[in-house]
Image: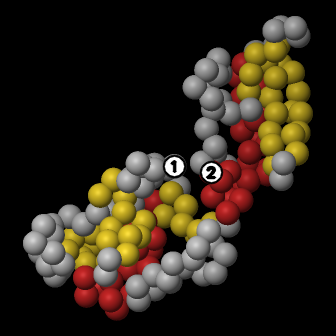
């Protein structure tokens, strides 16, 4: 993935105002983009993007740099709640690629438990809990009731992923 140099904090403050997770234009950059207009558009990826000097940037990265100046090398900006459109500064944090990916994992849409790593094992007639980290599966046990399987999974998430648990 090509690294794109982000504008400086000073430049971002010259172009935008920030309020409650959104950027508002301070200067008119085109005939369509007026002063005080909300900046950005929804990309098919689900992220909001903004154009600055003919270059497109994810809004969450711009908001981070607007507040803190830069993003350290090899770190990403994670949406704590997993909502790509929630760019409130309180919802953004620095994360490694692995941490960011672990926070964004969700249960499959056909899951009977609606909990990642908890599923019904028909042959055993029990709920099974497991977790995956560093491409390794860890079996957490089989349980008669779903609540105990979910509790085992949640405890393992905290142990393995800490604050980045899904």
- Circle 2 residues within 10 Å: few <14, some 14–19, many ≥20: some
Q: In the rendering, at what x and y percent does residue 157 appear?
A: 74, 45
Looking at the picture, the colour scheme in use is: secondary structure
Q: Give the residue displayed 82% in from the left and 33% down from the top.
A: 130
In-image side of 31 versus 10 (left or right)? left
Residue 59, label in figure: none
* Above or below for 54 versus 142: below
Residue 82, label in figure: 1
Q: Judge by depth and name the residue closer to the eye, 137 or 166.
A: 137
Q: In the rendering, at what x and y percent does residue 74 appear?
A: 67, 75
Q: Give the residue displayed 16% in from the left and 81% down from the top.
A: 27
- Residue 15 visible, this angle: yes
Write down the residue under mark 2. 103
Q: In the rendering, at what x and y percent does residue 29 appear?
A: 18, 78
Q: Secondary structure at mark 2?
A: helix
Q: Quadrant of the N terminus?
A: bottom right
In-image side of 33 versus 21 (left or right)? left
Q: Give the residue displayed 74% in from the left and 27% down from the top.
A: 118
Q: Quadrant of the C terminus?
A: top right
Q: In the rendering, at what x and y percent does residue 20 appear?
A: 29, 63
State the CA–CA distance, disc 2 to disc 1: 7 Å
Q: Judge by depth and name the residue closer to the eye, 43 or 117.
A: 43
Q: Which quarter of the picture shows residue 162? A: bottom right
Q: How many marks?
A: 2
Q: Are marks 2 and 1 in contact (CB under 8 Å)?
A: yes
Q: Give the residue displayed 33% in from the left and 68% down from the top.
A: 50
């Amino acid at each position: 993935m090509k690294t794109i140099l982000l504008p400086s904090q000073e430049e971002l403050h010259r172009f935008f105002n920030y309020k409650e997770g959104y950027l508002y234009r301070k200067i008119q950059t085109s005939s369509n983009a007026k002063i005080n207009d909300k900046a950005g558009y929804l990309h098919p990826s689900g992220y909001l993007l903004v154009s600055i000097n003919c270059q497109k940037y994810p809004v969450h990265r711009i908001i981070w740099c607007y507040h803190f100046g830069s993003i350290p090398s090899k770190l990403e900006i994670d949406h704590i709640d997993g909502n790509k459109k929630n760019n409130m500064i309180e919802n953004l944090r620095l994360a490694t690629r692995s941490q960011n990916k672990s926070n964004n994992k969700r249960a499959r849409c056909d899951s009977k438990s609606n909990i990642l790593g908890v599923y019904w094992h028909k042959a055993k007639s029990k709920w099974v809990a497991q977790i995956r980290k560093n491409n390794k599966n860890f079996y957490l046990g089989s349980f008669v009731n779903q609540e105990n399987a979910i509790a085992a999974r949640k405890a393992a998430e905290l142990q393995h992923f800490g604050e980045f648990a899904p």
